[in-house]
Amino acid sequence: MKSRTKARSVALQTLYEVDISDHPPGEIFKARLEDIPLNEDLAEFARQIIFGIIPLITELDNLIARYAPEWPLDQIAAIDRNILRIAFWEFAIQGETPVKVAINEAVELAKMFGSDSAPRFVNGVLGSLADYQNEINRALQQKEKED
């Protein structure tokens, strides 16, 4: 597994547990790092993903629901929902990961952690979101101005 994929995997596992439990994200992340050690740079990358997404979960979910309405979030498996959040956060908010890379990485995570149909599903949803990237970026910038 590529090193940044490994960091995304740790972030995904942490976000998944946060999503399905009331456990504190910092404790979950620390436990994941004990199970899957990462060097300092990769641990920081995973930390940025986790703590970049958590305060924006509602906003990310609203945007996913708005721009990919054929996939209601409440009907999406928790693991798939978190894979979508990671990729979407990377290309729409963080902005350092190219869209194609974020989608490819998400598909890889879906292959590792999701159901048999998850890779195709994740690719489809993220492809829809990517089609609206400029509109989404404008919506996020407007939201930042309002806050």
Image (cartoon, rainbow, N blue to C red):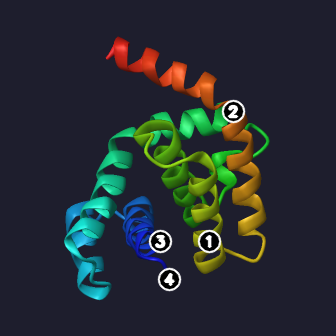
- Tag 3 residue: 5
Can you give x and y, in whole percent of width and height, for residue 1 in the image? 50, 82
Residue 113 found in image quarter: bottom right
Pointer 1 with pointer 3, Cβ within 8 A: yes
The number of numbered badges drawn on the structure is 4
Kindly identify the amino acid type of the residue bearing the numbered disc 2: Tyr
Whole-angstrom CA distance, mark 2 to mark 3, is 26 Å
Pointer 3 with pointer 4, Cβ within 8 A: yes
Q: How crowded is mark 4: few (under 14 residues within 10 Å), some or many (20 or more)?
A: few
- Tag 1 residue: 108
- Tag 4 residue: 1
Please say if 64 is above or below 77: above
Whole-angstrom CA distance, mark 2 to mark 4, is 31 Å
Quadrant occupied by the C terminus: top left
Which one is nearer the viewer's eye here, 77 or 135? Answer: 135
- At horizontal 60% and vertical 46% (from top left) the residue drawn is 99
Kindly identify the amino acid type of the residue bearing the numbered disc 3: Thr
Can you give x and y, in whole percent of width and height, for residue 134 in the image? 61, 25
Kindly identify the amino acid type of the residue bearing the numbered disc 4: Met
Whole-angstrom CA distance, mark 1 to mark 2, is 22 Å
Q: Residues within 10 Å of mark 3 (few under 14, many from 20)?
A: some
Pair 2/3: label in front = 3
Please say if 96 is above or below 76: above
**In the picture provided, is 104 more to the left or to the right than 11?**
right
Label 2 vs 3, first from the N-terminus: 3
Which one is nearer the viewer's eye here, 135 or 3? Answer: 3
Can you give x and y, in whole percent of width and height, for residue 133 in the image? 62, 32
Kindly identify the amino acid type of the residue bearing the numbered disc 1: Glu
Can you give x and y, in whole percent of width and height, for residue 34 in the image? 23, 84
Pair 1/2: label in front = 1
- Tag 2 residue: 67
